[in-house]
Image (spheres, grey):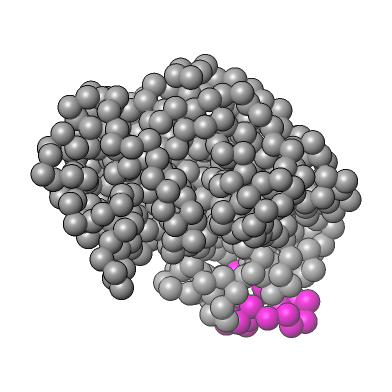
Amino acid sequence: MGIVPKTPFKIEAKLNCSTESTFYDTKIDLEDGDLLIVDVDPQEKWTPYAISSKSWVNANGISVDPKTYDGIYEEPSGTARGISQIADFKFPFGSLIGTVDNGVTYFPVGTHLELTVLKPGRLKLVFWGGDHNTNDGAITANVEVRKAFNHDATIENDISLYGNHFDIHSKVHSINGKMATETHLNTNIQLKPEDVLIVDVHPKDLWSIYSENRVWDINANGVAESDNKTRYGNGLPTKNFNFTYGSLVGTLDDGKTYFPVGTHLKLTVLNPGTLKFVHWDSDYTSNNGSVRAFLNVIRKEPEGAIATEPKTRYKIKITVYVPTSIAYNNTFGIFAMNNDGSVAGIKPGEPDYAATVVKNRIPLPGADEGSYKKGDTFQGELVGGPIYGVFLIANGTPNQFLEQNPKNEQKEWRTPKAYFFNTAANPDKTSHAKVSSSMVANPDRASNVKVLPSIEYGFEDLYGGGDQDFNDLIVKIETLAVETII
């Protein structure tokens, strides 16, 4: 079909349910090598079970609060409802899924997808799983199709700056490789739900599927350099999947299912797994050469986290607001953490987590003593690169917490306790913090460095979560100055 401008399609959970095979037909016929782009607002929700608040999920199958799967639904291979499905497919309940062969195979869509088409067909979209009798809600998928990547295409970003690259060899990593050998290239990169995986291969980076005839020097889309429209074969059925001959393909479940990669892929991960690559062909013995895949993984920041830029120093201002009728003397803190919330190798929920965080907190002169008054302000510095989290010491200071309750246990009510956004780290496993408001960050005009967003946090200080109005302590963080560190 070629170029298709961004077009909205309303997918309804009741009407377009995978278990009923009632796919939403976009009437877009995708051609081999097209770039398919799909965007869905992550705040839009639908559900496989309308009376359960947890079951209302976004197009990634993730509920808004708590942020978790409602479940995983598996469609086994076989013939059902008139469709001969050739492999087992598992995706989160309520995730947005696509197909170009009317349900013989599926691929994840989620909230964002940029996919190089390596198998042509009619694009259809579907709500994954559930019973159409209990499903409810709808999301809008904005679909766009751009011109196919060819050897003269330019890449918008500098892929050499990506975090990782891997050389996939057409002979060693052939899907039909040497018997009794592992032919997938294992990146050893563990992907998690809602990670964004970006893979780029330069369109002029070539490998050969028939080394004796250099006409078949092709790129990762399976397109020959001699003619941008020439392919050795439009599709090669192997292991129940069909992709362009000589193209680059990926898997997250060790080859049970595959998805196209080609010269460009930007994928919101729905199912966790280890990323592997393979060259899609029929006979490894005639192959030659390799292509280099550049990878970038964007991890979803933990709730309430502050993301910073490397080689940057931020001077911050902290303003606290304390209710007039408050029984506790609370203290606020900031700490650097990894994407999984861990600090110094200790993860949320492990016995020494709270003490490790408090010991490694960022110095905030004056703020550690507690006894805040309404409108008190403090200043501090954050060195860019890590992500930062926040915590509350309820009814105490950090030092009092470390002396009296370093294991963060539920003792008598006066004992200081530490509370975090990650409920696994809280002694009652209950929510004690939320972002009350957040203003989008803008570049600092003097240095052209992105400043931190202005964030306001609200906290609950009672064991068990209190009244959940998150106003026992309110803390606002603003950027005063930004400087680049040479």
Judging depth in this view, the residue of 416 and 388 nearest the camera is 388
Magenta stretch contains residue 411: yes
Judging depth in this view, the residue of 158 and 78 nearest the camera is 78
Determine the image quadrant of residue 262.
top left
**Secondary structure, magenta segment, majority class:** loop
Determine the image quadrant of residue 18.
top right
The C terminus: image quadrant? top left
Q: Residue at x 25, y 37 (%)?
A: 219
Q: On the rendered structure, is 136 left or right of 125?
A: right
Q: Specify the segment rendered in magenta.
A: 397-417
Looking at the picture, does residue 15 appear above or below residue 333?
above
Q: Residue at x 57, y 64 (%)?
A: 369
Looking at the picture, does residue 477 appear above or below residue 86?
above
Judging depth in this view, the residue of 334 and 166 nearest the camera is 166
Magenta stretch contains residue 329: no
Q: In the image, residue 167 lies at what x, y percent?
A: 22, 53
Q: In the image, residue 118 lies at what x, y percent?
A: 41, 38
Judging depth in this view, the residue of 151 and 72 nearest the camera is 151
Q: Residue at x 52, y 60 (%)?
A: 272
Q: Residue at x 23, y 32 (%)?
A: 224
Q: In the image, residue 357 lies at what x, y percent?
A: 51, 69
Q: In the image, residue 240 lies at what x, y percent?
A: 48, 54
Q: On the rendered structure, is 279 left or right of 424?
A: left
Q: On the rendered structure, is 159 left or right of 391?
A: left
